[in-house]
Image (tube, grey):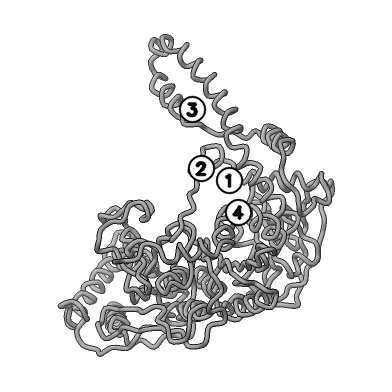
């Protein structure tokens, strides 16, 4: 009885503490931990739950209900229940009714977030993945111990120290290879073209994850600079300043700023990045929480580093969050042109709350919406819930082609028409053909990467100016045959359905056998034709994979992105003509 009474008191204490915590966070008075880095929310008055009729007493009532159910399950369920698992399931259930970005983060996810934010970790410096049950090096990071000692893309790690890594997950392999800077780890690898394993003793170091992996001149004749930004971390502002300053010193007269597949990051870094291009005291973004008084405006605070260089910002469907703040602010102030595809559409701000130190979780909670200078939100309704089918808007088609309504129309500083409610819509659309079944399967199965490892092992000293010709494509196809690559065309999928329908009906199967044989012949011809139709894509992707494998990230940008990438080519075309650039920046003005 005493134990039961103590248990009731303990659970009641937890319930009251939980209620207090939820209330404080809900009223915006929680003091962010230093690691709550995604946004800062404004404090507001305590009292009723703002925006609803939910009172403090009502919240206590439902928290007591939750506590009572937990106690009854713990006391009366037919089997023993793990308390922690039950409570965590309840928390995830609460978060399930919120947006997709409000989540309970376990330690691994939290550590990954912090690593991405801080931009450093201690280890060897390489990207790895599990390929065919073996940990495979995808790419050594330039300037790291992994690259300096000679590890290569495609090397298969079979031992870490004396432990076999065959069948090991990437997470477990990463844990073994990481450790304090200055310590060493022994890797045993198998390399294509060599018969014996190689053993490397690699000294760990502090690895810097750069926000700017590459910058350089995209066009020497027209002095067009190029900067690639892949995330917004604590070092983004300084890295960009250094890159832009160097390009200016080299004579850049215009600029391509590549934000494709940049998933975002720190809000303050998005503001500072925008300020490198916009004049001082320009509104960049404002956030609005539930409390009308919680609006927070962010302005550029310094003189712009490049206030007047003609500017093209490259975006695509992977450009999200902080990247959309930057591209949206540049578009709204008519500072440059947005080129590419409609962006992801994440107009929400998250704050990370560290929970008690005894727990291995953190709460990432959406605390506000953000709005770019024209007053538009770029949040897609289908991304506002964990269950998109519950919303009316489920179509992610490009808003350039199909604006939803007049209420989504806004205007830039100079009167150009722009759209809200579904990502940042580009000023110039770069159309991309839909990937064919052959292409999808080659990417999904990693065949370009695997072929690059194989090809570079037997063709030494591949030049930076390498281009894949018909002979290389033929060698690629032979490699696919040798490795039993196959894929299904749409016709073959339909054929499989037909065969399945006839499987238990021998008489009908005999009737249609001739037709089935003809369709199989047609499928074989269709697959041959697929390679011919995709030949240009095959040449491009083979070149991309080989340059990345042999010459690393720098060579990949120099010899592929700046020369062959269709987005970069469109940007160079626009920036090479002052008249075209001015025309596009003055188009579609309101009357």
The structure residue drawn at horizontal position 31% and vertical position 66%, both measured from the top left corner, is 590
Q: Residue furthest front?
A: 579
Quickly name the residue at label 4: 565
Q: Nearer the viewer, residue 206 or 202?
A: 206
Q: Is residue 61 left or right of residue 538?
A: left
* Label 4 – label 2 distance at C-alpha: 16 Å
Q: Tell which circle, 1 or 2, labels the residue nearer the N-terminal end.
A: 2
Q: Nearer the viewer, residue 284 or 64?
A: 284
* The disc label shown at residue 435, or none: 2
**Circle nearer the viewer, 3 or 4:** 4
The reply to whether residue 1 is visible in this rendering is no
**Circle nearer the viewer, 1 or 2:** 2
* Label 2 – label 3 distance at C-alpha: 17 Å
Q: Tell which circle, 2 or 3, labels the residue nearer the N-terminal end.
A: 2
**Circle nearer the viewer, 2 or 3:** 2
Q: Are marks 1 and 4 in contact (CB under 8 Å)?
A: no
Q: Is residue 140 left or right of residue 79?
A: right
Q: Tell which circle, 4 or 2, labels the residue nearer the N-terminal end.
A: 2
Q: Secondary structure at mark 4?
A: loop
Q: Are marks 3 and 4 in contact (CB under 8 Å)?
A: no
* The disc label shown at residue 443, or none: 1
* Label 1 – label 4 distance at C-alpha: 17 Å
The percent coordinates of residue 346 (x first, y second) are: 39, 66
């Amino acid at each position: 009885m005493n134990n039961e009474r103590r248990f009731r008191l303990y659970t009641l204490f937890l319930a009251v503490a939980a209620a207090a915590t939820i209330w404080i966070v809900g009223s915006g008075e929680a003091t962010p931990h230093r690691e709550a880095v995604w946004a800062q929310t404004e404090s507001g008055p305590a009292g009723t739950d703002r925006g609803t009729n939910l009172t403090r007493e009502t919240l206590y009532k439902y928290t007591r209900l939750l506590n009572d159910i937990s106690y009854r399950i713990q006391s009366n369920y037919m089997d023993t229940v793990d308390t922690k698992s039950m409570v965590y399931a309840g928390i995830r259930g609460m978060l399930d009714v919120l947006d997709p970005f409000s989540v309970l983060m376990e330690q691994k996810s939290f550590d990954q977030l912090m690593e991405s934010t801080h931009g450093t970790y201690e280890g060897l410096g390489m990207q790895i993945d599990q390929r065919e049950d073996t940990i495979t090096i995808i790419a050594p990071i330039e300037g790291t111990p992994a690259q300096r000692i000679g590890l290569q893309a495609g090397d298969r790690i079979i031992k870490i120290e004396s432990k076999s890594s065959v069948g090991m997950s990437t997470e477990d392999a990463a844990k073994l290879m990481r450790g304090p800077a200055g310590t060493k780890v022994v890797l045993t690898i198998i390399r294509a073209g060599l018969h014996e394993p190689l053993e490397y003793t690699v000294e760990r170091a502090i690895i810097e994850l750069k926000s700017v992996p590459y910058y350089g001149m995209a066009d020497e004749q027209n002095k067009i600079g190029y900067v690639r930004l892949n995330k917004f971390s604590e070092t983004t502002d300084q890295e960009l300043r250094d890159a832009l300053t160097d390009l200016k010193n080299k004579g850049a007269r215009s600029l391509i700023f590549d934000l494709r597949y940049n998933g975002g990051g720190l809000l303050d870094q998005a503001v500072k990045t925008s300020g490198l291009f916009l004049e001082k005291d320009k509104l960049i973004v404002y956030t609005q929480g539930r409390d009308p008084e919680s609006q927070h405006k962010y302005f550029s605070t310094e003189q712009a580093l490049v206030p007047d260089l003609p500017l093209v910002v490259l975006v695509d469907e992977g450009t999200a969050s902080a990247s959309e703040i930057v591209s949206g602010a540049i578009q709204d102030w008519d500072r440059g042109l947005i080129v590419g595809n409609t962006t992801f559409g994440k107009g929400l701000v998250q704050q990370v709350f560290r929970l008690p130190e005894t727990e291995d979780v953190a709460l990432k909670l959406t605390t506000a919406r953000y709005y770019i200078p024209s007053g538009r939100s770029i949040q897609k309704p289908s991304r506002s819930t964990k269950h998109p089918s519950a919303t009316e808007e489920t179509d992610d088609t490009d808003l350039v082609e199909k604006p939803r309504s007049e209420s989504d129309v806004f205007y830039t500083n100079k009167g150009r028409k722009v759209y809200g409610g579904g990502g940042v819509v580009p000023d110039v659309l770069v159309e991309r053909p839909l990937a064919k079944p052959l292409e999808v399967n080659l990417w999904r199965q990693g065949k370009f990467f695997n072929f690059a490892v194989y090809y570079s092992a037997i063709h030494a000293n591949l030049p930076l100016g390498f281009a894949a010709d018909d002979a290389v494509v033929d060698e690629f196809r032979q490699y696919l045959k040798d490795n039993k690559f196959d894929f299904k065309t749409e016709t073959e999928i339909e054929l499989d359905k037909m065969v399945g329908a006839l499987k238990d009906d021998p008489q009908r199967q005999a009737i249609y056998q001739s037709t089935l044989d003809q369709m199989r012949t047609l499928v074989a011809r269709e697959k041959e034709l697929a390679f011919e139709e995709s030949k240009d894509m095959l040449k491009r992707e083979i070149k991309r994979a080989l340059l990345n494998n042999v010459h690393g990230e720098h060579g990949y940008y120099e010899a592929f992105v700046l020369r062959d990438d269709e987005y970069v080519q469109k940007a160079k075309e626009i920036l090479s003509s002052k008249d075209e650039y001015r025309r596009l920046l003055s188009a579609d003005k309101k009357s």
